[in-house]
Image (cartoon, rainbow, N blue to C red):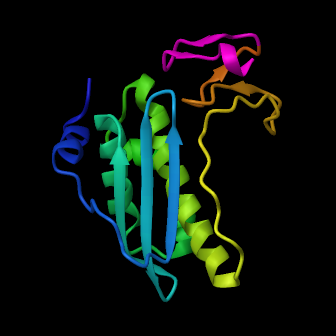
Amino acid sequence: MYSKTVMDHFRNPRNVGVIEKADGIGEVGNPICGDMMTIYLDIEDNIIKDIKFQTFGCGSAIAVSSMLSEIARGKTLEEAKKITNKDVADALEGLPQNKLHCSNLGADALQMAIKDYENRKSGVAPIIPSMKDIHDHGSKDGQCYCPYCDIEIERDTTFCDACNSSLEEDH
């Protein structure tokens, strides 16, 4: 079910912790599955010199945060902006279908931390973290996607079989 890489990053997570006086902070969560991630960045000369995370959630969420931190460390901000949920899942040698939403949370948290850094640097007020729990039919391609695992679903779907999430309140 889980790859050796996922189990290694779950059992021995890298870069756990908080960076005091972080240059950028990204926080995301999914109230349905209970996963919460916070990414802290230390940026010097446009390079991620240090990255730490705090994750409260399942083993996949912890493994995703750990792998994400390994991938992002040492990258320029432009390189880090290109890190996707697929990159993280691939580096972990795959995740079960019902845990793919965890890789989305990790990539989202990193992008939020980068945006927070850029906003701070330009004097814009900090981003207030938001929970990913709203189902939006207004996607750019006109399709409907589960708000928890991002799989394409029918518009009248009330339950996502991919991640076992109820969508009744969102429809």
The residue that appears at 56% across and 30% down in the rendered structure is: 148
Query: Which quadrant of the figure has residue 11?
Result: top left
Residue 153 rendering spot, x and y as whole percentages? 67, 18
Residue extending furthest bottom? 45
Residue 135 in sight from this viewpoint: yes
Residue 83 in sight from this viewpoint: no
Residue 50 drawn in magenta: no
**Residue placed most toward the observer, 74 or 112:** 112
The residue that appears at 69% across and 11% down in the rendered structure is: 157
Residue 53 rendering spot, x and y as whole percentages? 36, 59
Q: Is 97 above or below relative to 47?
A: above
Residue 101 rendering spot, x and y as whole percentages? 49, 34
Count of marks overlaid on the render:
0
Q: Is residue 121 left or right of residue 110?
A: right
The residue that appears at 62% across and 47% down in the rendered structure is: 130
Q: Is residue 48 left or right of residue 17?
A: right
On-image quarter of the N terminus: top left
**Residue placed most toward the observer, 50 or 170:** 170
Q: Is 148 above or below relative to 86?
A: above
Q: Is residue 40 left or right of residue 153?
A: left
Residue 169 rendering spot, x and y as whole percentages? 68, 17
**Residue placed most toward the observer, 84 or 158:** 158
Query: Which quadrant of the figure has residue 124?
Result: bottom right
Start and end of the magenta stretch?
Answer: 156-171
